[in-house]
Amino acid sequence: MTDKIQIEVAYATPDKQLILSLHVAAGTTVYQAAELSGIVNEFPEIQLSEAKMGLFGKGVRNPQEEVLREMDRVEIYVQPQRRKKRLLIKKRRILPRKRLMTNRSRYSAADKRKGPIGPFLMFTN
């Protein structure tokens, strides 16, 4: 049995993505691999102690205990609340809110009873 395994560590933002390939000792955990990769040097906003991690798109509950196997890809995920907030801000910049039209008339019931002249009286002055 070999004592080194090959793995990948991946992280992406909307602007940039990075996949690092490295050899680590057998028995290395997901968290240790993320630390050894040095991905924090490229993306200083990552806080590994708080970051969610996974293997091939499936979340890992405890990255400090999950042991890696040959050719595993460790993925570091963006915090969902921060990502959702960023998407909302981006969406508002692209598509400003529009006023929804309703089926309600803009005239009151009293104005309608006045007859055809009623609505026109509202605009005189």
Image: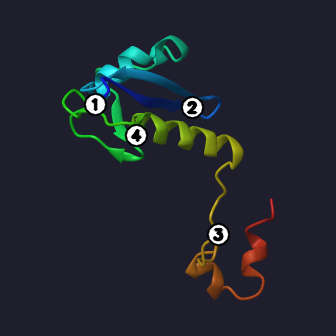
For the residue marked with disc 3, what is the amino acid? Met
Amino acid tagged 4:
Pro
- Residue highlighted by disc 3: 101
Residue identified by numbered label 4: 80
Q: Which mark is residue 1?
A: 1
Position of residue 76 in the picture relative to residue 19 (left or right): left
Mark 1 or mark 2: which comes first in sequence?
1
Q: Earlier in the sequence, mark 1 or mark 4?
A: 1
Question: Is residue 41 rendered to the left or right of residue 14?
Answer: left
- Residue appearing at x 62%, y 46% in the figure: 91
Q: Please state, as top left, top right, bottom left or bottom right, where the C terminus lies in the image.
A: bottom right
Callout 4 secondary element: helix
The picture quadrant where one finds residue 90 is top right
* Mark pair 2, 3: CA separation: 37 Å
Q: Residue 21 placed where, x, y %? A: 51, 26
What is the distance, in whole Å, between disc 1 and disc 3 at their CAs?
A: 70 Å
The dot on residue 13 is: 2
Nearer to the camera, 28 or 96:
28
